[in-house]
Amino acid sequence: MRLMQELFSTDVGLLSIAGIAFMLGMGVFYLRYFLGHMAQDEQREAAARR
């Protein structure tokens, strides 16, 4: 319980939470970005083959 209290009440803990949230957000963004571009490339290639 003490660890959770320190995590949410100290500057270092809050910065750690912010860093983790930022990194997870970046991961989600890049995952969606790359998957979207992969799908676009597949559509372009399929259209070029026709």
Image (cartoon, helix red, strand yellow):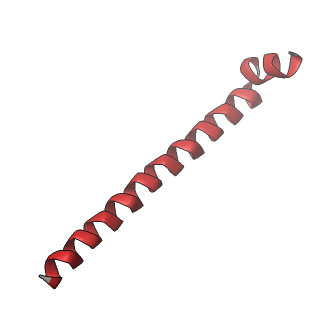
| In this rendering, position of residue 10 left or right of residue 30 | right
| In this rendering, position of residue 47 left or right of residue 26 | left
Quarter assignment of residue 37: bottom left
The mark tally for this picture is 0
Question: Which residue appears farthest toward the left when viewing the image?
Answer: 50
Quarter assignment of residue 9: top right
Quarter assignment of residue 49: bottom left
17 up-or-down from 26: above or below: above
Residue depicted at x 76% and y 22%: 10
35 up-or-down from 25: above or below: below
The N terminus lies in quadrant: top right
Question: Which residue appears farthest toward the right when viewing the image?
Answer: 2
Question: Which residue appears farthest toward the front when viewing the image?
Answer: 50
Q: Position of residue 5 (x, y in %)?
A: 80, 16
Residue depicted at x 46% and y 55%: 31
Q: Position of residue 38 (x, y in %)?
A: 35, 67
| In this rendering, position of residue 30 left or right of residue 11 | left
22 up-or-down from 14: above or below: below
Q: Position of residue 29 (x, y in %)?
A: 44, 49
| In this rendering, position of residue 28 left or right of residue 15 | left
Q: Position of residue 43 (x, y in %)?
A: 22, 69
The C terminus lies in quadrant: bottom left
